[in-house]
Image: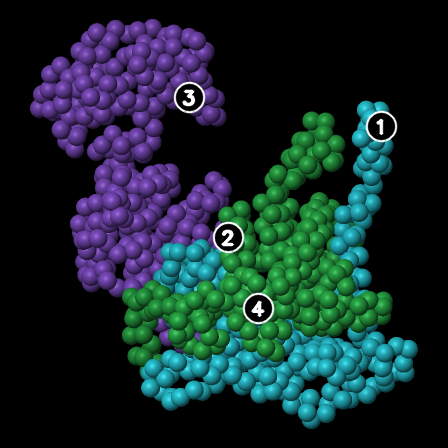
Amino acid sequence: MSIVSIQDLRKEFGNVTAVEGANFDIEEGEFVSVLGPSGSGKSTILRMIAGFESPTSGSIEILGKEVVGMAPFEREVNMVFQDLALFPHLTVAENIKYGLQQKGVSKDEQQRRATEMLEIVDLAGYGNRDIDQLSGGEQQRVALARALVNEPSVVLFDEPLASLDRKLRQRMQFELQQIQEETGITFLYVTHDQEVAMSVSDRMVVLNEGKIEQIGTPEEIYRDPESQFVAQFIGDLNSVYSKVVEANDDTVEVQTNGTLVRVPVMETTTPALNAEAVDIGVRPQNVTLQQTSSNGDGTAFEIGGTVINRMYRGDNIAYIVDTEDEEFLVIEQQDTRTEFEIGEDVYVQWKTDDCLVFPSKEVA
Amino acid sequence: MNVNTIIRPLERFLEDHGKQVGLLVLIPLFLFLWLPIIVVALMSFSDSVLTFPPENLTLEFYHIFVENSQARSAIFTSLQVSAVATPIAVALAIMYSYAFAKYDFPGKGVITVLIALPLIVPLIVVGIALTLLFGMLGGSGSYWEVVIAHIVRILPFAALIILPSFLSFDTTLEEASKDLGANSITTFRRVTLPNILPGVVAGGLLAFTISFNEFVYTYFVRGTGMETLPVYLWGRIEHTMTPEINVISIVFLAVAVLMVALAVIITDVERITIR
Amino acid sequence: MATKTETSKFNEYSQSVLDYIRDRPRLQVLLLAGPTAGLLVAFFIVPVLIMVWYAFLTGLPPADYTMENFSRIFDPLYLGIIGDTFLITVATTIFTVTLGYTLAYSMVRFSRKTTLLLLLVILPFWTNYIVRMYAWINILQADGVLNWLLNTGGVVEGSQRFMFSHEAVLVGLIYVWLPLAVLPFYASIKTMDEDLIEAAKDLGAGPLKTFFTVTLPMTKNGIYAGLILVAVPAFGAFVTPALLGGTGSVMIGMVIDNQFNQAFNWNFGAALGVFLTLAVVASLLLAVLAGVEDKILKRPDTGGEN
């Protein structure tokens, strides 16, 4: 049985549809991220699971029990709020015990579990401190402990790490993963930050404009994005508009630089086969720059252009190349190839195997 | 557990219907606040004093009020006092706020407490204390004594409303002005004042309202000749209930509505509610 | 009319004064804050000190010193009045704070027209105090609104008066100070982080428990402010008891008025004024101490850890 099961979930605010036709399940012990840009409806889904918003239609089951219509305080889920929402008038320990008090847990048991929880989040001995005496990272841990101590079926996270600086955020991500493995409690993590989502989650739910675009493991979503939105949102993507010359069973033939190339199309994006034009996408890491044209042999794409910007980035160099109709982002590992200068004429090349084919967004 | 069986359904009820309960509670509370004022407004058109409901509606009391020279001169006295006390208090409040916002000086905390004190000490205490002072100085409750009493009364309010304007004012604008060659006075006139003006005007309007309504200080300090409108109203109610009381009440109500409305338009409601 | 040279001379002169002041920040402060401080010292601090002095005199100065005026306060007659004043103040404060908090809470949490409602709360406050008392005379008077309502409802027969009682004074004081009490409550409830309420509910607390364990403690400072804003003026009230209480409900303020304007015993009046001031100062100190104590008790064993 799934811990959380969401079916046909829909939420309207007046005329605006914030969430539409959302379906997904979360299994016990999973770490699932809901990823999407701001306004994509990810927080709304979270707040519906917590009970702060009621869905316009659809169902939310927690441990097989329908929870739509239940008040937040009647649900067996706990949330780590975006701004943490720690009670400033209570001490660290009092914050952690708050949920247990509501359940009517005995004082001794409250104390025991709070102490245990403080150890798990590495804050042993901090129980009597005031919230405002803690650093940002310590406050994050208290918020986590306050949710975990109730042993909820699922802990919901509303982008709590967003306010931390990069270093601290990465450390907290790592700790979060460890604590999740340690306790075995199911986590549902909402974020707009693909880096966070990729690094912590077992599975990701990618949202756009209230609709789920794709569900899968971070690898699946990065390697086989089902839509151009997903491909662009998870990592960088260059994209070229191409007219389809001929479509076959699992390939399309398109023209590039005067030659015809045959590009494999993934199963998930086969609608592209019936399109008149496609967008050919490629990740910047998969693109190379050449000084001379290699006069295509049908296995590679090639476009001529001029280097207009060059950014040194430590272990690699990023180039921006101006081609006829697109600007290309190219990331070259620093050790391997020759360096190019701004203003130099170059050829942008990539293998057909690295292409991601999507129905074109541009109207032909 | 026993407690929970009672509380749980109640909590559930409040979760679902808390908003309705809250809005329902607002109705009697706002009736309590406004019914008395509505009654006074209604009674000003009555043909009898203090008998409710009025038998006939008439404008007769308004005629009596307009033709009563004593009431007219009370209004005139009130205006004479408030029109002088208000600008003085506002000017003092501006100067003080400017000093408070711009400088750190010894005794800053003491002066701040000093300004807030008249708000905390009961009115009647300050009223008699001023009476004793003026008595010692050989005064007889003349115009200027009443004006001074009014300044003491309204200065804290004016300062409390005007000070936030100065605290939120970006002082780098002044530095920019001086950098561009303007002297202190020009800078104040052309840069500082326009930015703090809404707060100052709101403070002035409300200070005027308090002064116009001021009773306790005036009542103790005044000599026989100084009868402001609130003092006149008090006399009518205490001794002889005359019909024009209702109309005077309407005058005060109108002044309150007008001044608060103006202050709200110039700044916003939360600003004029103090602290 | 000043000629051109005179004007420029004046400008030159004022410029040199400005130059003199510019490098002397202390002088600037003195010029800016001095008049306010001076005015308040001369017409607030000095008068209060004179009042204290009068309280120890047998008559108008020059006169002998005496404790008579203070010992007279402990006369059963005045002790009774002080007791009544105290009880009315406590009752007024409890009612006003409860109603005011309810009002502020409902306005902020449940209404979408919060600003309009706030305006409707403060408008009565800016209406003349005596007018507001007169409104209640209209209501409580024989043949007044309340009598009419009760007659219409068949509760009482004939003309009945509800004035000149402790209850009338109580209602009058609640009415006068309710708007003022709403303001600090309104501010503290409005600025409270609403996420905390969601957090409490998320952790299993219903609306009632959330209110008592989170909202109420979080708005504690606003409540203290409201308590003081109501209790202090209620304790020193004299217009309300004079108009609505009369001889049926005498408060200290009325006695002071009587000593000054009828009995002409300014010394005893001054002694009562000193008593009133001390009572207010004592209660304020108590409130401050309570606040301080609260802070110390909250962090019993965190010392040295940070």
Q: Which residue is mark 2?
A: B261
Mark 1: amino acid: Glu
Residue at the (79%, 44%) spot, across then down: C28
Are the residues flagged by discs 1 and 4 in contact, CB closer than 8 Å? no
Colour purple, chain: A
Foreground tag (1 vs 2) = 1
* Helix, strand or loop under label 3: strand
Colour green, chain: B
Foreground tag (1 vs 3) = 1
Q: Which residue is mark 4?
A: C129
Are the residues flagged by discs 1 and 3 in contact, CB closer than 8 Å? no
> In this orientation, does residue A83 appear?
yes
Specify whether disc 3 shares its chain with disc 2: no
In the picture, measured across the screen, residue C155 lies left or right of residue C37, that is left
The chain to which mark 3 is attached is: A
Q: Where B83 falls versus C235 (above or below)?
A: above
